[in-house]
Image: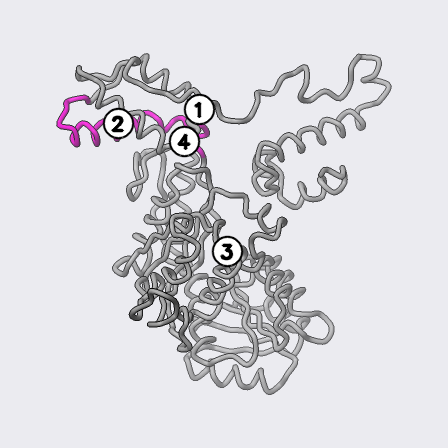
Amino acid sequence: MPAILVVDDELSMREFLKILLEKEGYQVSTAPEAAIALDLINKQDFNLVISDIKMPGMGGLTLLEKIKEINNTLPVIMITAFASPDNAVIAMKSGAFDYITKPFKVDEILKIIKSAISAAAPVIVDEITSDTESFEGIIGNSHEMVKIYNLISRIAPTPASILIYGESGTGKELVAQAIHNLSKVSDNPFVPITCSAIPESLLESELFGHVKGAFTGAISNKIGLFELADGGSVFLDEIGELTPLIQTKLLRVLQERELKRVGGTDTIKVNVRIIAATNKNLENEIMEGRFRKDLFYRLAVVPIRVPPLRERKRDVPLLVKHFLKKYSDKMGKEVQEISSYAMKVLMDYDYPGNVRELENIIERGVALESSNIILPESLTLSTYKKEGKPVEKSQAFIAVESEDELYDQGLDEVMTKLEKQMIEHALGKTDNSKIRAAELLKISFRSLRYKVQKYDIK
């Protein structure tokens, strides 16, 4: 029996949830305040904590932070009678599984509880190693890709929302498809939607459907893509292109698992797993007021970064082999090999268009080649160079101009200057994404944020 701890200063709410959950077969403990709850968590194992936000003494959000320090994998559902977007954002950012407001529907909270316990259950998977050349249609066995394969294997069986980010052409949709294929709803629809490909005036209708007469041309009722995907997965590519109105409606689907068609009044229940992807820096979009902070934290329960091809050059030969076979078969040719010099040319290239560009290069090479081996002259590489200048010793990380100055300033001051320069360089390289800059510098996000404030880096 899963064990649940209910934390609420209202006796009636504690008793209501205890009776309700025990009827459902759960083992339920209760606590009237956060301090007692922490004592119970330290003494026994729980599968879930349900906590009110507003409580005397230590509040629910502080309790959430302390729970995550004790056991980062223990799911926590926050409830409150005072709905606040700021509280919702803080709760989700601090690691809450979900955030619901009173009064809530019994069937809705039971569904959330079931999902939370299921998501936290250990998933047994075989460890994927670099011996694997491909995984669910994704080609590559570099260290970076093997890490992604293992992450997919662990999160796919859970209902967690996922945000995939990376440059265009890196294969974000393949990652989304792999997650769906390994999920518990793999027999149900996988519906990919490219948000930027649908005109803004039609996007709301395409996603949520419409009723007859909702607007000029709406001659009949139409089912939206979310309804078509009911029971399965929706892949929202280029999520950063959504308008504020659509972002608000999408947040409702994530929170309430329901929607209304354009022009309609009926509430339609939908149960879909949302996998989103973007090539934008959504943190910057939030700062500029173009993307909702609460939606971001709902989507990014599990973030996955797909690296650009220039960061995983080890995969280039495997991808070349795969595309050679694919296009030789498609064009009825026998081009199955590539010369060593042609391969060197490909290994030295930076691929601003990533895997998609490499595929196009090989497709053109197979089409142009008259022999059974790809030669350098059959390769058509773009002259475009990826932004990002090489570090020049004379410019990049210079703290002093002379040996005398070095010892006049002393070790601490020189190292401080170098540290500031490295942080500024890393932020510039990652389009001001603190998360990615921290990864690049191999320090924690919290440490980077502290140093940015300390050095007043803009």
Horizontal placement of 250 versus 420: left or right?
left
Mark 4 closeness class: few <14, some 14–19, many ≥20 residues within 10 Å: some
Of mark 3 and mark 1, the one earlier in the sequence is: 3
Which element carries disc 1, helix, strand or loop?
loop
Q: CA distance from mark 1 to mark 4?
A: 9 Å
Of mark 3 and mark 2, the one earlier in the sequence is: 3
Disc 1 + disc 2, Cβ < 8 Å: no
What amino acid is at disc 3? Thr
Q: Nearer the viewer, mark 1 or mark 2?
A: 2
Disc 3 + disc 2, Cβ < 8 Å: no
What amino acid is at disc 1? Asp
Disc 1 designates what residue? 350
Q: Identify the residue at image location x=41%, y=18%.
A: 348
Of mark 4 and mark 3, the one earlier in the sequence is: 3
Which element carries disc 3, helix, strand or loop?
loop
Label at residue 363? 2
The image shows residue 350, relative to residue 131, as above or below, that is above
Q: Main secondary structure of the magenta part?
A: helix
The image shows residue 50, relative to residue 354, as above or below, that is below
Q: CA distance from mark 1 to mark 2?
A: 18 Å
The image shows residue 63, relative to residue 414, as above or below, that is below
| Residue 182 x/y as whole percent | 31, 53
Disc 3 designates what residue? 243
What amino acid is at disc 4? Gly
Mark 2 closeness class: few <14, some 14–19, many ≥20 residues within 10 Å: many
